[in-house]
Structure formats: structure tokens, C-alpha cells
Image (cartoon, helix red, strand yellow):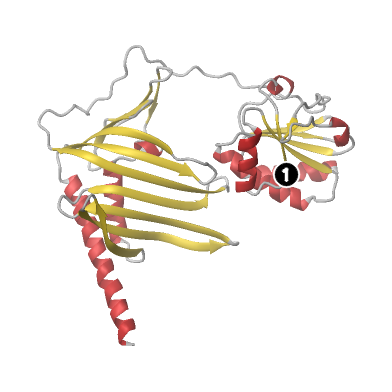
Amino acid sequence: MLALICLILFLFFSGDACAQFLVKSSEKIKSLKNISYTDIVETKFSFQEDFYADTLRSYISFQDRFADGRFFLKGRDISYSFDGNRLVMLNFKDSTYNVEKDKVLNQDTRTLAYWATKMQKLSAKMRVDRREYQDTIINGMQFANIRIVESDTIDNSEHFYNISNYIIDKTTKFPIKIISRFKGRGDDGTVFGLIEIHNYSKFVINKKKFPDLSNTSIPSHFKLPVSRQPVVFLANGTIAPTLHARDLTGLELDAKKQKGKILLINFSLIGCPHCVGAAQMLNRINEKYLGKDLVILNIYPIDTPEAILKFDLKENVKTSSYTSDRSIQKAFPFDGYPSFYLIDKQGRIAQSYDGFYKELEDQITKMIESLL
């Protein structure tokens, strides 16, 4: 009993100490006039094999009324500038730009100011599980290691969580590493996980000659992306073209075997979060109509058989996958990934679907019911 009481007291006081340390780190960052640093960002979605890494040179100014800071980030192929009113993204690969009002456009725009604000919010949430682990030793130096569990639940046998680790220099109060782990559902119902790691170094604070971040500019040679004309899908009622594809062993798809059956074609791409959601949806549809006259085919015009096989195993894909090439878009026009064609028993286009969204499963199943 005494040991249990000691453990409870340790966790209580340790959690309180963690909260205070997070606040101190946040306040230290936001008390600065300006700060520049290097951030090596590593991200990996659950359906990806490898991490994607980029090195961002980052500049943040906390002057004037902008508590979350103005910033400029420059990576390998893209830069982001936020002047307090708009976010300008420059793409160095094709010399195009985009302008947004939202300063958090995606993971790469999450500056140290973003994490400072988040640390402050987390420290105020009494229900958040805060644990201080044994100090982390890096290059012989001690750093605080604080683990935050925002959520950790089981839903329909799926383990969902939102957990982060903050490794902070005890002297400077600056984070030197932040690790964020998430698994949950997207807005479209897709179940996916994400690991995001920030590695901070080369801090320079309150520099007198600091870039002016109050007005974002667009280089004269940069242009807006060319607007794509929407692709016109095959019209409902038309005879579907012959589908040319190969299975993952290289054998040609036998179109004769699909005669007299309802055919649902999914044009897919590995590395696309919405394609993961589509695969999960098609698993459910396949199970619902098992033994009925429905055939589901996943067609990959870009990816290799080896990559598709890994993806199918990792995501537990229960429907058949095939390879093709981009010329298949001439026979079956579509506008992006995933895209779907539903073909009736007479071989005519019953319906096409562009993209993956929450209502799609219900729309497809209702159409299948009408065709059976």
C-alpha cells in the first residue's frame, strides 16, 4: 500500500512538474523578439515504407501583435512565408506559388511557434496524461523527456492514439526534438497513422539584423499553377472499353471472366491517403457482397507489382490488384486518385465516381443494389 501511495504521489508531482516545464519552454520561446534555427523534419504515414525528410531553415519574429509569430521557412523544394495576413508558398521545382489565409497549410508549416502554443495548451489540460521519463542523454548532455498522451482508446478493435514526446534542453528551455505519433480517422473516415519528428539545432536568438517578415513577396518569375481542365468521365450507359491490365505475377487480365457480373474498378495510387481509405471501403463492400455477382478490381497505372504487394499486405487489402500504365486513362478517363467506374452486367457504364469522400460508400452500395 505504501508503495502504491508513493507511486501515485510521484505521478502527480511529476505531471505537475512536466506542466510547469512545458509552460517555461513555451514562455521562453515567445518572449524572444526573433529566433532562427534548423529543423530536420521527418514524416511517415502508416501506409508508407520510409520516412520523408527535409531540412528547413526557419525564421520567426514575435514582434507586434502576432503572438504566434510571423515566419519564413525554406526547405529543399518549397518555402513558406507568413506575414500575419497571408501565407505564400513557393514551389522551386516549377516556379509556381500559392497564397492562403491559413498559416498552417500542412505539416511543414508547423513552426516552433506552433509547438510553443501547443505546449502551453497541453500544460493547461489537467486530464492529459503527462509523464516525465528519465532524462535523455544526447552527446553526453542531459535533456528533459516529457511524454504527453492526449488520447489513447480502442474503437472497434482499432487502437487510436495521439501521443507526443518533448525532449527539452534544461538550460536553454528550447526543444531539441519533438516526436508526434497519431493514429485515428480522417474527415473521410480513413484510418491512418502518422509519425512526425522535428530535430532542432543551430538556434540564433534576438539577432539585430533579422529578415523583415512583415510583408511577404512573390518573385517576379513565379506564376500561379496552370488550372487543369476537368476530365470528362465516360458517360453512363455507354459500352465500357476492354480493360487491359496484368495481375501482380504478370498475367493478363481475362476480361471474359467478368462478363455477366457487376464490375467495380478502382484506379489507385500508393502513397495517397485517400487511396488507403478507398481500400478500406472496398474491403467492406467486398465482404458485404461476397458470393454475389460483384467483382472489385484495383488498377495501379504507376506503381510496380512489388510496391503494390507490400501495400496490399500492410493495409490488409482483400480485393484483387492489377498493374497497368498511364495509357489506360485514354480508355477510362479519370481526374485523379482514387477514381471509380461501376459497370453493370451488360458491360455498360452504370456510374463513375471522382475521389474518395465520406458519403461514397453509401452511394456505391445503393447503386450496386440497383444493379444486382
User: Compared to 45, does 327 lie above or below?
Assistant: above
- Res. 88 in view: no
Outermost residue toward the top in this view: 221
- The quadrant in which residue 334 appears is top right
Outermost residue toward the front in this view: 140
- Image coordinates of residue 80 in percent, x first then y, are 33, 29
User: Compared to 293, does 326 lie above or below?
Assistant: above
- Res. 17 in view: yes
> What residue sits right under mark 1 in the picture?
319
- Image coordinates of residue 184 in percent, x first then y, are 51, 53
Which one is in front, 324 or 347? 324
Q: Residue at x 48, y 40 (%)?
A: 50
Query: What is the three-letter code of the residue carrying label 1?
Result: Thr
Left or right, residue 360 beside residue 31 = right
Q: Quadrant of the C terminus?
A: top right
What count of labels does the image hold? 1
Which one is in front, 274 or 362? 274
Outermost residue toward the bottom in this view: 1
- Image coordinates of residue 371 in percent, x first then y, are 84, 41
Q: Residue at x 19, y 46 (%)?
A: 29
User: Compared to 36, does 224 lie above or below?
Assistant: above
Q: Residue at x 35, y 12 (%)?
A: 221
Outermost residue toward the left in this view: 208
Left or right, residue 358 beside residue 222 = right
- The quadrant in which residue 271 appears is top right
- The quadrant in which residue 32 appears is top left
Helix, strand, or loop for circle 1? loop
Q: Residue at x 82, y 43 (%)?
A: 294
- Image coordinates of residue 159 in percent, x first then y, are 53, 59
Circle 1 crowding by C-alpha within 10 Å: few under 14, some 14–19, many from 20? some
Q: Quadrant of the N terminus?
A: bottom left
